[in-house]
Image (spheres, coloured by chain):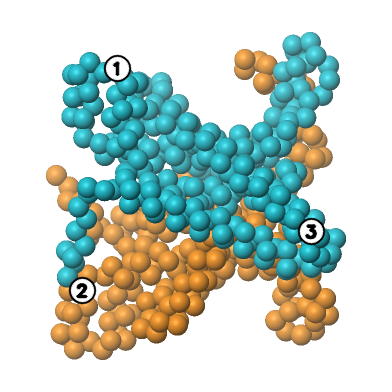
Amino acid sequence: MLDYIPRILEGALLTVAVSLLSLAVSIVLGLLGASAKLSGHPVLSALATVYTTVVRGVPELVLMLLVFYGGTIGLTHLLETLGHTEAVDINPFVAGVGTIGFIYGAYMTETFRGAMLAIPRGQMEAAWAFGMGRLQTFFRITLPQMVRYALPGFTNNWLVLIKSTALVSLIGLQDMTYLAKQASAATREPIFFFVFVAALFLVYTSASLWVLRRLDERFSLGVRRATSWQS
Amino acid sequence: MAELIWPKDPAVNWSVIFEPAQLQLYAEGLLTTLKLLLSSLAVGGVLALFLALALNSRYRWLRWLVGSYTYVIRGTPLLIQVYLIYYGIAQLEWVQARWDAVWPWTWFKDAFFCALLAFALNTAGYTAEMLAGAIRETPAGEIEAARAMGISPRQVLWRIVMPSALRRTLPAYSNEVVMMLHSTSLASTVPAMLDLTAAASRVYSDFYLPFEAYLFAAAIYLSITFMLVGLFKWAERRFLAHLAPRRT
């Protein structure tokens, strides 16, 4: 029974990889989505609104199956029209990271939009007055101040994202959930393996929570927090 | 580009989806999804009420016990919780030896019950934390006023604190209900269950039409999500009118 443990721990590394890469995708999409929503450009903001509404209204699993199975057929047809004949298989790793990143990009969009709105407009106007360009203003003025406002929502999204990575086991990626399921079928000890993997997830979420709390303290330095107003 | 991804023929074939046999499959799946959603919300909701009270109990051990429960539930994937119940408990020889005759174990023979149990325990963990927060944030003045009127502590809890806390939980709870609707799609990972997602998977594997099969299910999920959001907006207007910003 213990022979399976090292293999599951390897799967845990894959879970970490999937979650971190999806996080990167979702942050990029979230920043783009939030900028689009706040751009005032009618087409861009409508697109971003459709994105966040539709993605947050459909189960992750359904989107993942759609991308994985639908993507395979879509790509095959795409290649056929381009003159290739071989069938393509979508890599489950790419499909998993892509889908989870795409889904949480929608949640990040909402979080980042709120954080951007919380920064006084005068800050950006002052930067423009100094002659900074749009991108420079974003990276030097908006982004560093956004972090503090975005962190609570970001923490929440990240924790949900970690847990949703278990779904990649359903499209055949050999993450720790997948390996635990195999091990439990082989040894007929399902409770042991599922509790083990649940504990690994708990360690991962707890560690993330700890790091993000430290980060929150760091970025909230200089913010006075009244605590005794309730008396 | 659209032509490439959505070739007209024969890749996209909506007519198959709208044949009676497939529509019936989707309808059955939808019914199971809604049954799962409503029953796990009902069971989980009642459980959450008591867990929320325990989280505000004066006994430290009880707070700690229930706090650990919600921490574990909220820190692990629902998929693993479903597996633990369906492949873990329900497949134990000890349980299977009893599930024909001995009472609580007879339930585990039923895949629907296993899914319901996992979902209800899960939503109870999340809802309990929200509700406990709302109870904790009850303005002290309301409780003092009630006590000054001579209302007993027990009555203060059920007549003053709970009605107000339940109302203030509504906005957060609407998110939880939508999350739960989406979570029921995990029932499709249990072989014996035919929910909306499983219906889509079956149509996909029967006709090899992944886009149509899953998009159709996604559209149904999206419409139910909109309906739930609308319902909660209405409920907030109705029950939280006293907290709404003044109209100018």
> Closer to the camera, A213 or B194?
A213
Task: Say which residue label 3 marks.
Answer: A4
Chain assignment, label 3: A
2 and 1 marks in contact (CB < 8 Å): no
**Residue A179, placed above or below residue A40:** below
Task: Say if residue B217 shows up in the picture.
Answer: no
Determine the residue positioned at 57% across, 60% down: A202
Determine the chain carrying the residue at label 2.
B
Q: Position of residue A91 (x, y in %)?
A: 73, 33
Q: Position of residue A118 (x, y in %)?
A: 26, 39
Q: Are marks 3 and 2 in contact (CB under 8 Å)?
A: no
Query: Element under label 2?
Result: helix
- Nearer the observer, B89 or B35: B89
Q: Nearer the viewer, mark 3 or mark 2?
A: 3
Q: Amino acid at mark 1?
A: Gly
Mark 2 residue type: Ala
Select label 3 or label 1 by which is in front: 3
Q: Chain of mark 1?
A: A
Chain corresponding to cyan in the figure: A
Q: Residue at image x 21%, y 30%?
A: A123
Q: CA distance from mark 2 to mark 1?
A: 51 Å
Q: Quadrant of the N terminus of chain B?
A: top right
Mark 3 → mark 2, Cα distance in angstroms: 54 Å
Quadrant in which the C terminus of chain B appears:
top left
Q: Which chain is orange?
A: B
**Side of B79 where B90 appears, left or right:** right
When the figure is inspected, residue B214 is found, relative to residue A72, above or below; the finding is below
Q: Which residue position is annotated with label 2? A: B140
Q: Which residue is mark 1?
A: A133
